[in-house]
Every structure is written in C-alpha cells, then in structure tokens.
Image (cartoon, rainbow, N blue to C red):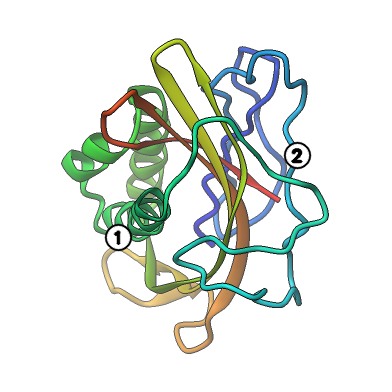
Amino acid sequence: MLLIRFFRSRNPSPARANGGGHTERRAYEEPTQPAGNGSFRIPSIGSGAGLGGGSAATGAATAAAEPSDEIGITDADLDTFEQKLHEVQAAFSREDYAALRTITTPEIMSYLAEELSENATSGRKNDVLDVKLEQGDIAEAWREGDTEYASLAMRYSSIDVMRDRTTGEVVEGDPDTPTETTELWTFVRDKGGEWKLSAIQET
C-alpha cells in the first residue's frame, strides 16, 4: 500500500517507521507544532467508520475530538486537498519527479525521490489506481507568521499493488480488490499561496 508516512512530532530529526504497506515506508517530520496548542488532535476516523452527514469533498465530519481551525479553511481549500490526494498518488505511481516537486515541499520530495529510487533498484514499481476519497475531516489548521498549515484526516480507497518492473507481473497486492487507508495529511502554504503537501501520518 502507498503509505508515505511522515510523522509530525517535536523531534526535528527523521525517524524510521516500522512495517506496514507493500514497502517499508519511512516516517519524517517537517512542519512545526502550532504555537501554544500543544499536541494536535486527530478525529476518530478509521476502518468501519461511517461517512458522516456531509460529503468527503467538503470535509464534513463527526469526530471524537473537536477540530481546531485558526485560519478559516474554506470549501475551496478542502477541494484542493482532495485534488492533491489524487495528484500525489498519481505522480508517485508514474514516478513523475517533476510533478511531485510542484505539489510537495522540498523536504518531502527528497524522501519520495529516495523511495522511488529504492523501488527502481529492487526492480519493483508501486501502482496506485482508482483513488477515491471516502471521508476528509479537518483535524487542525493554524498560522505561524505568514505561513499557514492545515492537517486533514483522509480515509480513501484505492487499488494498490507492487509490480515487477520488467514483466509487469503483480508481486504484492490484489489488482481487483480496493484497500482502504486512513492517514493525516498536512499541507502548508505562504499566506495567499498554493497549498503543498508537507507531511503524511498513518493513523
């Protein structure tokens, strides 16, 4: 499974994650914690959770923890976050470095590039198709100076397989059965600028 896990934490140095997915993914920290808020809260969204009263595109949610939004996330922002989910997954599957650079921060891009390189070296290719956002909920949004951050809990389904680079044969995963993933995606932008992917945490 395409689990690009980048953990937000108070530790400024990268740390290696354990297990999960078709490849051993890594955990990294890039955005800072919101000033004065302590640790952020993640809504209770997981396997078997209902879709709630609103649509996934608008991020309507019923969460156990009350989300914190200091910057006023709009429906347009939520639509952008859903679009970024599709763009990142598609670009990673295509191994499109140029596209990934336009939609992620340089720090996250360096880790994605390293992982793509490792897949190529091992003779494998990760394909993620038919990505569908089932539910998206704002966990926290905050501002530090002119920089804005937004963390969104995303539950999505996809066809996720690992293929042999030479033969195209599926070596891991089921090409006919969607899998479901829940992750916390963090986006960052300069005030008035374009949102870019800054971190991903598996929930």
Q: Which residue is mark 1?
A: 90
Kind of residue at disc 1:
Ala
State the image coordinates of residue 71 (x, y, percent, origin top left): 50, 31
Q: Residues within 10 Å of mark 2 (few under 14, many from 20)?
A: some
Seen at 73% across and 21% down, the residue is 37
Establish if 161 lies above or below 151: below
Quadrant location of residue 83? bottom left
Counting residues from the start of the chain, the first of labels 2 and 1 encountered is 2
Kind of residue at disc 2:
Arg
Q: Residue furthest left?
A: 98
Q: Which residue is mark 2?
A: 41
**6 vs 111, nearest the viewer:** 6
State the image coordinates of residue 197 (x, y, percent, origin top left): 40, 38
Alpha-carbon span between mark 2 and mark 1: 29 Å
Q: Residue furthest bottom?
A: 176
Q: Residues within 10 Å of mark 1 (few under 14, many from 20)?
A: some
Quadrant location of residue 106? top left
Q: Secondary structure at mark 2?
A: loop
Seen at 47% across and 73% down, the residue is 158
